[in-house]
Image (cartoon, rainbow, N blue to C red):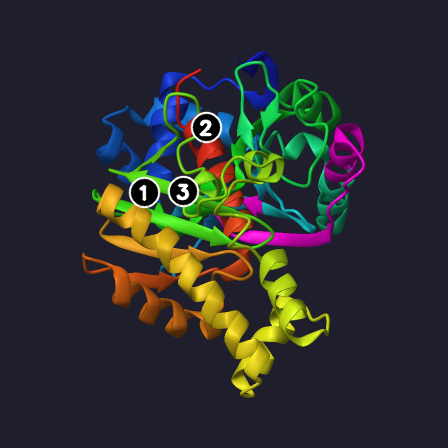
Amino acid sequence: MKMREVGGVMSGIPSATRTETMVLRAIWFEGAETRSQLGASTGLSRPTIIAALDALRERNLIRTSRRKQGSLGRDPEYIALNPRAMYGIGVDIGGTKTAAALVDLRGEIVAEITRPTVQNGPESLVDSVSQMKRRLLANIGADARLAPFVAIGIPGVLQDDGRLMHTGTLVGLDTMDMRRLFEDRLGCRVHLENDVNMAAYGELLSSESFSEGTRILISVGTGLGMGIVHRGEVLRGSTGHAGEIAYLPISADQETRESKRHGVAEMLVSGPVFEAQYYKLSGTRRSADQILELYLGDDRHASAAVHELALQLARVVVSVVVTLDPELVVMAGGLGSSPVLHDPLLRAVNAISPLPVKLELARFGGRAGVVGATTYAQRYLEKLLITEG
C-alpha cells in the first residue's frame, strides 16, 4: 500500500485512485447514499463503483448498512463516510496555557485537554505537545497512525528556515527549526501558524461567517495581535508580519529596549499591563478576571483600570480600521473577548473613530485558537483525502 508523502513527511494516508476519490467526494460533499446515487453523481459504471467502495471500505473510510424497506426483496445498502476513520489534532499554544483537541473528519471535536504552557525552552515545549497528542489518542483508544496531521497556533512569525520570531514569553524558538523539531517529535506532518491568524481562521473562515470582504480579529490576552482575512484568505504579508499590531506606535516612547522587544502597543494593551495598572492604583494584586468582576461591583480602581484599557485598545482598533476599512472587527483572546470590556471599548471606539465600526465578540471566546487549529486540521485531511494520489 503506497503512502502519500507531503512536504517530506509520510502522511499515513494511502494514495487513492481517481475513481476512489470521485466516489468519496460524492459521499462526502453530495450526500450520495446508494450505488445508484453514486452512479448518477459520478457517471461511473456499477462495477467500477463497487470496486471503489471495496477499496474505501478496506481503508475504513466508509460505513455501510441496510435499512428495512418492506417485506419483499433485499433491503438496499446505504453508504456513509466514517468520520472516525482518521483524526486531526489542533493545538493552541498561549503564553500561559496550551490547549489541544482531537477532531474527526466531519469536524467534531471528540477529545480536548489543557495544560500550562512549558516555558523552559523549545525542546521541552515540543515534548509537552507530544505528550498531549498521546494523551488525546489514549482518551479514545486510537492508534497514532490515525492522526497523521497536527495544526499548531503559536505566538510568533514563522521564518523560511523554520525559526519563530517575536514569540513573547516563549524563549529560544528563534534558535532552531521549530517546524522540523515538531514533526520529528510528533511523528507526523505539522503546520505552524501564528496563533492569532489561527484564531482568525476559526472565527472568520467557518461556513457560518464566511465573507468575501475584509474582516479582522484582534486578540488581547497575554499579548496583543491581529489576524486579517480578505476574500476568504488569511493575509500574512510579504514576510509573515502582517497583523503584528503590538508594534503600532501609539505612544511616543518607541525606542526603549522593551518597546522594541514587545512593541509599544502591547506595553499599553495586554492582560499583564491591565493587572499592573490595577495594582498601581489599588496596591492590591488581582487577576484580569477578578478586576473585571470588581468593575461590575463599582470598584473605583477597577473602573479606572478598565477605562484606561478601553481607551488604549480603542486607539489600536481605530488605527487598523482607518487603514484596512474592514466590514467587521472581532475581539478575541482571554481579555479581548470579555463581555464586561465590550461596552467600555465600544464607547471609546465610537468617541474617536471617523468611520463606523462594527465590533463583535469572538464566538469561541478564549477557545478561538484551538477551534481554528482543529478547523485547519480537519480541512487539511479533507483536502488530502479527496485529492487524487
Residue 290 visible somewhere in the drawing: yes
Residue 70 visible somewhere in the drawing: no
Q: Secondary structure at mark 3?
A: strand
Residue 203 image point, x, y percent: 40, 51
Q: In terms of sequence position, does the residue under pointer 3 or pointer 2 come before the other?
A: 3
Q: Secondary structure at mark 1?
A: loop
Distance between the alpha carbons at the discs numbered 1 and 3 = 37 Å
Distance between the alpha carbons at the discs numbered 3 and 2 = 28 Å
Can you tell which mark lies on residue 339?
Answer: none
- Image quarter for residue 186? top right
Q: In terms of sequence position, does the residue under pointer 1 or pointer 2 come before the other?
A: 1
Residue ID for mark 1: 32
Residue ID for mark 3: 227
Q: Secondary structure at mark 2?
A: helix
Q: Is residue 82 one of those drawn in magenta?
A: no
Q: Quadrant of the N terminus?
A: top right
Q: Is residue 114 one of those drawn in magenta?
A: yes
Q: Nearer the viewer, residue 63 or 371?
A: 371
The image shows residue 28, relative to residue 280, as above or below, that is: above
Residue ID for mark 2: 385
For the view shown, which residue lies furthest in the left direction? Answer: 355
Q: Nearer the viewer, residue 124 or 206?
A: 124
| Residue range highlighted in magenta | 103-130
